[in-house]
Amino acid sequence: MDQCTRHPGGGKLQADLREVAAIPGCQLTVHAAAAGPVCRTDGHDRPPHLSPHERRWREGLAAATRYYAVYGDLACTNAYVHPDGFRLGMWLANKRRRSDWLSPEQRKALDDLNM
């Protein structure tokens, strides 16, 4: 899938687009000027406005979900790197070490993966 030239980083991975499409009220559309995918909400074309922290959380949760689907647990080493390049082992270690920083929703999402 093409990367949106109007909003760098918005739409470079199909997995990201599936996550964006799962946001209630969001429809993926194409910028007329950029011919790249963006999120359309409230009648305006714009990329999803996620903080770097939220974007990283979603990337980590998606990688953890894929790992769990294959192996049935999240017992990877700290050095484990997901095939897409995401450092899942380190991400999980950080979440375990700083679990008191997680929101109730984040804690539930990881609990659903038996972490």
Image (spheres, rainbow, N blue to C red):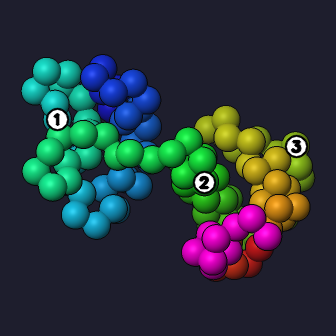
Q: Quadrant of residue 115?
A: bottom right
Badge 3 crowding class, 10 Å Cα cut-off, few under 14, some 14 to 19, many 20 or more, is: few
**Label 1: which secondary element:** strand
Q: Residues within 10 Å of mark 2 (few under 14, many from 20)?
A: some
Sequence-wise first label, 2 or 1: 1
Query: What is the quadrant of the N terminus in the image?
Result: top left
Is residue 105 found inside the magenta-colored segment of the image? Answer: yes
For disc 3, the marked residue is 79
Q: Amino acid at mark 2?
A: Trp
The answer to whether the residues at label 2 and label 1 have Cβ atoms under 8 Å apart is no
Which residue is denoted by mark 2 in the rendering? 57
Q: Is residue 76 visible?
A: no
**x 39%, y 24%: residue:** 8
**91 over 3 or under it: above or below:** below
Stretch of the chain drawn in magenta: 100-108
Q: Kindly report which numbered mark, 2 or 3, lies closer to the viewer in this rendering.
A: 2
- Most frequent secondary structure within the magenta stretch: helix
Q: Secondary structure at mark 3?
A: loop
Q: Are marks 2 and 3 in contact (CB under 8 Å)?
A: no
Magenta-drawn stretch contains 29: no
Check disc 1: other Cα within 10 Å, few if <14, some if 14-19, many if 20+: some
Q: CA distance from mark 1 to mark 3?
A: 38 Å
Q: CA distance from mark 2 to mark 1?
A: 26 Å
- The answer to whether residue 111 is above or below residue 85 is below
Q: Nearer the viewer, mark 2 or mark 1?
A: 2
User: Which numbered dot is residue 90?
Assistant: none
Quadrant position of residue 86: top right
Q: Which residue is mark 1?
A: 30
N-terminal of the pair, mark 1 or mark 3, is 1
Q: Amino acid at mark 3?
A: Ala
